[in-house]
Image: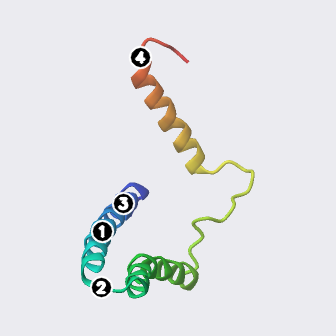
Amino acid sequence: MDNTKLLAFGVLIVVLHTLVNVHISREIHQWVPSLQKRLVLLLCVWFIPFLGVAIAYKTLNLDWFKQESKNSSPGQSTMGGAFLEVDAIFNPGKNI
């Protein structure tokens, strides 16, 4: 699976998670009478998924945020090429 599909899948998960949490938060706000219970439920709804991501990150040894060495990596040249293509779209008459 290439990075574009993985990124699109991640964005879809985040959007769906946010929509569901907003709906559940509205229901919690209308249903629970005490402020303390409401805050506990809201914290559980919003932070338990982040706890699951952290556990999966540690368990699967995912190095998403690991600092890379100063040597250039393929991702850096890809990003540079992408920025140049975007620049070419907005400035079509300029040559590099």
What residue is shown with label 3? Answer: 11
Answer above or below: position of 75 versus 85: below
- Nearer to us: label 4 or label 1: 1
Q: Residue at x 56, y 50 (%)?
A: 75
- The amino acid type, in three-letter code, at marker 1 is Val
Circle on res. 92: 4
Answer above or below: position of 56 versus 87: below
Label 2 residue SS: loop
Q: Residue at x 66, y 65 (%)?
A: 66
Label 1 residue SS: helix
Label 4 residue SS: loop
Circle on res. 32: 2
- Nearer to us: label 2 or label 1: 2
Disc nearer the start of the sequence (1/3): 3
Separation of disc 4 and disc 3 at Cα? Answer: 30 Å
- Nearer to us: label 2 or label 3: 2
- Nearer to us: label 1 or label 3: 1
Separation of disc 2 and disc 1 at Cα? Answer: 15 Å
Separation of disc 4 and disc 1 at Cα? Answer: 42 Å
- The amino acid type, in three-letter code, at marker 2 is Val
Disc nearer the start of the sequence (4/3): 3
